[in-house]
Image (cartoon, helix red, strand yellow):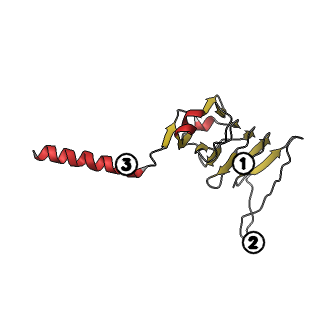
Amino acid sequence: MKKTILATMLLTIGFIHSSFSADPGERKRMDKTNPSAIKTLTVNADVTIVLTEGNNQQVNMIGDETFMKLVSFKQEGNKLTVAASKSRDYKSKGIIYVPAGSIETIRINSDAFVRSADILHTPHIRIAVNGVCKVHLYTMGKVDVDENHFYEVDYKSRNLLPPGYIAINGN
């Protein structure tokens, strides 16, 4: 009798905890990727992408049911491509977290929002703009923006070091 009551209480506590710990409409997916091999990120969907420092995490998607069903990513060799099966604005529906430790090139072919979660230590990132998009990156390295004649790029850069500090490039 005591075992039954204890088991019932544990199941009830576990159910209550899982019910209140997450948004019921939010889903999470981590697919097998090789984050240290991602050199090129191509964004072909109107999504929010957050670049994270390091190579030890997997690509991670968090979002509502529609986002999880219609947005996907695929890694082929050193290229990671984010796409959607329907042309919609998914920026407020979910987030894709991508480890950026090895990323050299970002191609944005959509109305995406790409930002960094923290300061990236990638030495050089090239961004190719082929869509109306927003990019907010904090990086210790160099950023080159490739624009084409269809899109105007408003590029702003600022040094976040306190006055008197000098950044030393190890090259």
Q: Is residue 109 left or right of residue 65?
A: right
Label 2 environment density (alpha carbons within 10 Å; few <14, some 14–19, many ≥20): few
Q: What residue would you read off at disc 2?
A: 164
Instruction: Compute the Cα span from label 3 to label 1.
Output: 43 Å
Q: Where residue 117 sits in the image (x, y, percent)? A: 61, 53
Which residue is rendered at x = 11% and y = 47% of the image? 2
Q: Earlier in the sequence, mark 3 or mark 1?
A: 3
Q: Secondary structure at mark 2?
A: loop
Q: Looking at the image, is 162 positioned above or below residue 82?
A: below
Residue type for callout 2: Gly
Q: Work out how far the residue at label 3 is from the one at label 2, CA to CA, in angstroms.
A: 52 Å
Q: Residue placed at 40% from the left, 51% from the top? A: 21
Which mark sits nearer the N-terminus, 2 or 1? 1
Image quarter hosting the N terminus: top left
Q: Residues within 10 Å of mark 3 (few under 14, many from 20)?
A: few
Q: Judge by depth and name the residue closer to the eye, 54 or 150.
A: 150
Measured as percent of width and height from the top left, residue 49 is found at: 64, 45
Residue behind mark 3: 19
In the picture of the structure, the residue carrying the numbered disc 1 is 123
